Amino acid sequence: MASMTHSRRWRWQGTDADGQHRRGEVMAPGEAAARLMLRDQRLTITHIRAGRRHTPAGRVGAADATDLVRRLATLLGTGVPLTAALDVLARGAHTRGLKRLASAVGSDVAQGHPLAQAMARTSRRFSSVDCQLIAAGELSGQLGPTLARLSAQYDQTRAVKEKLQRALAYPSTVLVIAITVVIALLQWVIPEFERLFASAAGGGVPLPPLTRWLIDISRASLANGPWLLAGLGATGLVVTAAWRRSTRIRRLRDRLILRLPGAGRIIRMMSAARWARTLGTLVDAGVALPDAMDAAASACGNLVMQQAAHDVHRAVARGARLASSLEAHAHWPLVIAQLAVIGEESGTLGRMLNQAAGLLDEEASHALVSACATLEPMMITFLGLLIGGMVLAMYLPMFQLGYGVA
């Protein structure tokens, strides 16, 4: 299979052992290999031609990957074989991305690759944890229920993201509009007032300190604005490159994020929920607890929480109970340990961890909504004072001119 990275897609037409006309596609490094693979399937080839070279189906959206898992779980649940289900999805896909993804996965599966390996090869949308979960379902003969469980996990993750987006939409919109208004005032409105003040009464009218300070800021933004934007962009690129290359810097950033007032608690709950949901799903799929914990640690997102997950994993590997290991670590919310105790004693650890993840997601969503509800009037008040102060600073000299004329 080493040459599969240079495979080409071959479109063929022929007849099967019953004399029925068939057509399809096969992945092979050359025409001879393609004919040999089709001959092994007892097919008589009448026409074959080369298609495009095989490339991973990476240009697909998250919705396409979710649709593939959901529809495949439905088809397998009705008793349709895996290869036939993938073929149905490829032919009946409602989006180009889903068609591309189903065709690529189906080609790899038809060549003998396991479904988990085919998904990992064809798209980056499937994480290593997802592929490990699918592999466990294949080994246990529970691929359909495993895909259904993974689809439910995708839906839960999407629901949480949508709640976060709705909660942050209004404050973000207000902030963007306010920044735009301030920039417009500094770049176009205040310079016009400055020219007006210079021409009024021969420019001999003394300006209030607030007005002079605002005019100085406007002059600086006009003179150094492009350089400031370029500097901020370059700084952003340097910081982004440092984050990507240095694990130490990313860990420091994540540690600072967890210490933010209010926001740190919400992020900690969300990271713990992702870990608990992934671990619970893997355990429910039949993955051994040590292997499941090793895979679930990468789902935390935050490096500090990921290190805490590895600490719990090492404690469990030394013989400690999962619940006691979670209680001993300050980073983990107490609800996970409480439900883990019930799960370990009743043999329903996976279900209890998933329930804990749901509770944490709900608590994090409520906390975020409450924080945004508190932040919105504060933002509106601050921005009103800021913009109102800028407008007042521009009109103070006009009041003085009016008094002088009077």
Image (tube, rainbow, N blue to C red):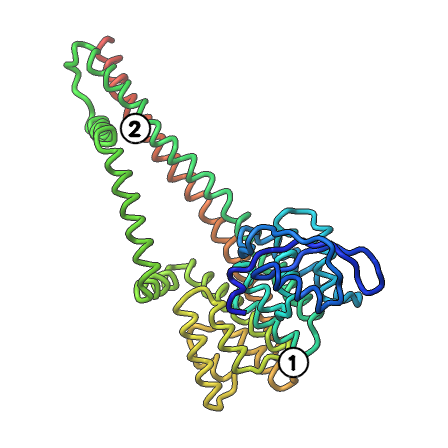
Residue named by callout 2: 186
Name the disc covering residue 118, or none: none
Q: Viewer-nearest of labels 2 and 1? A: 1
| Left or right position of 389 against 274 | left
What residue appears at the point 26 percent right and 33 percent down from the top-left corner?
Answer: 225
All told, the count of numbered labels is: 2
| Left or right position of 262 against 334 | left
Q: Quadrant of residue 289?
A: bottom right
| Left or right position of 401 against 151 | left
Which one is nearer the viewer's eye here, 28 or 375?
28
Of the numbered discs 2 and 1, the one sitting upstream in the chain is: 2
Pinpoint residue 39: horizontal percent, then vertical percent: 71, 66
What residue appears at the point 45 percent right and 38 percent down from the top-left corner?
Answer: 174
Pinpoint residue 124: horizontal percent, then vertical percent: 52, 59
| Label 2 CA crowd tier, 10 Å (few <14, some 14–19, many 20+) | many
Q: Secondary structure at mark 2?
A: helix
Above or below — where is 139 with respect to 222? below
Residue named by callout 1: 348
Residue lying at the far left of the rendered structure: 204
Pinpoint residue 127: horizontal percent, then vertical percent: 53, 64
Pinpoint residue 4: horizontal percent, then vertical percent: 54, 64
What residue appears at the point 81 percent right and 55 percent down from the top-left corner?
Answer: 21
